[in-house]
Image (cartoon, helix red, strand yellow):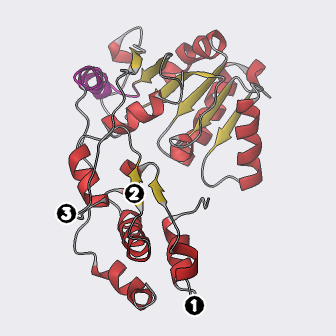
Amino acid sequence: MLLTTPETMHLLFSQKNNSKWFKHVKCFAVDEWHELLGSKRGVLTELAAAGVLSLSPKLRVWGITATIGNLEEAKTVLIPYSGMKTTMITAKEKKKIMITSLLPDAVEVLPWAGHLGKTMASKIIPIIYENNTTLIFTNTGNRSELWYQIILEQDPDLAGQIAIHHGSIDKNVRNWIEDSISEGLLKAVVCTSSLDLGVDFKPVDCVIQIGSPKGIARFMQRAGRSGHSPYEVSKIYFVPTNSLQLIEASALKEAVKQEQIEAREPMVLTYDILGSVFSHISCW
């Protein structure tokens, strides 16, 4: 078994006599396909699948995905071969998501637009103590740093029980934080999309989204970090930072209820990607 990335796959293809590595491959599984689809990393994945398939004609290609509105198109993009039989497998269980909007005592407290939403901090602290471990999502590393300070100012007793996780933090520190979450040593982690995907922590039983998640799929993906089991309820709180986001909170609830998830549009005619791997084609 080889666990790798689209970029590393193409580095392997650039090596001499690479066919010896791929001609006996039986399965090509693409996890989190919804995150790759719609990006040039997705195009690299499509080319890698085509390269392996040319060396191993009996190859089985699996696309694993969630929170995507155009499933059929997503399948066709990854497996575009008319002669290949395809099957779509979907879970029968419906994931239960409990969405709660944290409302200010008075709407006037919130500005019309912008701002951090610092006035809502007092409502977040009780939620942290009510749960084992809470992931608090912001949209940028800078925001996560600010909210870390805001929460500690609101409740200094959380010092040592709360951490920050984002892409700019040292890898060793990130690994330590992830291990600490798994072991139930942290009450809360203020994070960004660095914890959106592929990290399943059993102690996490609550998620807080501060401000707009910038998408229904992302909101559901983050909600799924809590209660990560088909039989548990994923619990997420939406914290508006301005008055307009109160409307967005209502729209998010309705979209999740109706299972209306945005589509991920595939990239086409990406000649720059094709050119960058053109030298490998003769090796395939």
Binning the other alpha carbons within 10 Å of mark 2 as few (below 14), some (14 to 19) or many (20 upward) gives some
Q: Is residue 171 visible?
A: yes
Q: Nearer the viewer, mark 1 or mark 3?
A: 3
Q: Is residue 245 magenta?
A: yes
Tell me the residue at 25%/27% (across/down). Answer: 259
Residue 26 higher or lower than 73, as above or below:
below
Nearest the eye: 201 or 247: 201
Label 2 belongs to which residue? 61
Q: Is residue 25 left or right of residue 71?
A: right
- Residue 158: quarter of image: top right
Q: Is residue 231 left or right of residue 75?
A: right
Q: Is residue 213 visible?
A: no
Binning the other alpha carbons within 10 Å of mark 1 as few (below 14), some (14 to 19) or many (20 upward) gives few
Q: Which mark is residue 82?
A: 3
Which of the image's four quarters has the C terminus?
A: bottom left
- Residue 276's x, y, as percent? 40, 84
Tell me the residue at 48%/67% (across/down). Answer: 6
Tell me the residue at 55%/43% (across/down). Answer: 198
Residue 231 higher or lower than 82, as above or below:
above
Q: Whole-Å distance between the Cαs marked 2 and 1? A: 25 Å
- In the image, the segment drawn in magenta is 240-258
Decide which of tag 1 and tag 3 comes sooner along the chain: 1
Label 1 belongs to which residue? 16
Residue 244 higher or lower than 198, as above or below:
above
Label 3 amino acid?
Ser
